[in-house]
């Protein structure tokens, strides 16, 4: 009987300690608050290199989570800014770009992966795999995810990556570990989704074209804004 009482007391102490630690370690400072003001419409260039804007193109938009309820007053919506554009290389090829920014990336409010957005839009998603892209001399390769979305006759290879705080994540577990890292420092990271896709080309040709588009895009972004896309390397 005494041994059981000791076990109950010990369990209660563990639960209480965990609750206290969770409260003490709860992130409170938004990284977005200390960041410079950002206007995606200005940061994402409308033309660069051989790429020119195609106004009538509308990429698939990120979807809010079903039943989402705003958890705090810092963010009025899932993403606070979105830029969705189509670009042509002048040779008949079109690349669609989606850049979405969210000031709060925590366990209650976190960027949606394109796998979820396209599935919600009625696409069948397959072939998800990781990739690395060398985009600039001296910089670490950019970690990306590739996949293919299909709906009826539409075949759309996709490349994307997510920035969480100062890190680029590649995978659900990776993002959770990054958020935990910032949480232990009392920080709530902001985040961004950068996604490119193409329609009308075979998969290999699509990814090759997307890689060139990403390199050209990042080369055209002002140096002081580059970390928004790539994190701090």
Image (cartoon, helix red, strand yellow):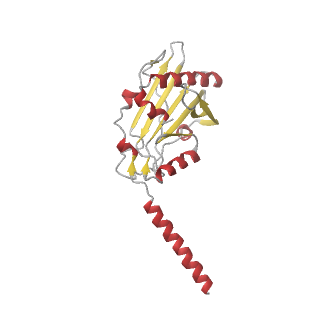
Find residue 136 and report its horizontal and vertical position in percent.
53, 25
Where is residue 62 shown, x and y percent of the image?
48, 38
Q: Is residue 51 left or right of residue 8?
A: left
Q: Quadrant of residue 91?
A: top right
Q: Is residue 150 visible?
A: no
Tell me, yes or no, if residue 59 can be seen here.
yes
Residue at 51% of width from left, 51% of height from top? 180
Above/below status of 96 relative to 183: above
Q: Residue at x 40, y 43 (%)?
A: 103
Residue at image position (54%, 33%) is: 160
Quick one: 169 or 34, which is closer to the camera? 34
Q: Position of residue 208 (x, y in %)?
A: 61, 22
Query: Horizontal placement of 43 versus 176: left or right?
Result: left
Q: In the visual, does 211 lie left or right of 224?
A: right
Horizontal and vertical percent for residue 52?
45, 17
Q: Quadrant of residue 46?
A: top left
Residue furthest front as drawn: 138
- In front of the other: 56 or 10: 10
Q: Quadrant of residue 137?
A: top right
Between residues 213 and 7, which one lies in front from this camera angle?
7
Q: Residue furthest bottom?
A: 1
What residue is at 62 percent from the left and 83 percent from the top?
3
Q: Residue furthest top?
A: 91
């Amino acid at each position: 009987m005494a041994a059981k009482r000791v076990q109950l007391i010990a369990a209660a102490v563990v639960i209480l300690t965990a609750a206290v630690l969770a409260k003490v370690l709860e992130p409170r400072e938004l990284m977005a608050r200390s960041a410079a003001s950002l206007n995606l419409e200005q940061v994402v260039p409308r033309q660069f290199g051989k790429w020119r804007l195609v106004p009538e193109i509308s990429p698939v938009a990120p979807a809010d989570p079903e039943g989402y309820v705003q958890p705090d007053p810092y963010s009025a919506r899932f993403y606070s800014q979105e830029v969705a554009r189509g670009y042509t290389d002048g040779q008949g090829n079109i690349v669609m770009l989606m850049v979405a920014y969210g000031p709060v990336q925590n366990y209650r409010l976190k960027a949606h992966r394109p796998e979820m957005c396209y599935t919600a839009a009625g696409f069948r998603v397959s072939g998800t795999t990781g990739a690395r892209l060398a985009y600039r001399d001296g910089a670490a390769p950019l970690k990306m995810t590739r996949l293919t979305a299909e709906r009826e006759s539409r075949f759309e290879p996709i490349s994307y990556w997510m920035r969480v705080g100062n890190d680029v994540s590649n995978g659900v577990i990776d993002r959770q570990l990054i958020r935990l890292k910032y949480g232990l420092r009392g920080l709530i990271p902001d985040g961004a989704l950068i996604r490119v896709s193409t329609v009308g080309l075979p998969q290999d040709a699509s990814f090759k074209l997307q890689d060139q588009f990403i390199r050209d895009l990042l080369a055209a972004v002002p140096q002081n804004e580059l970390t928004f896309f790539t994190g701090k390397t």
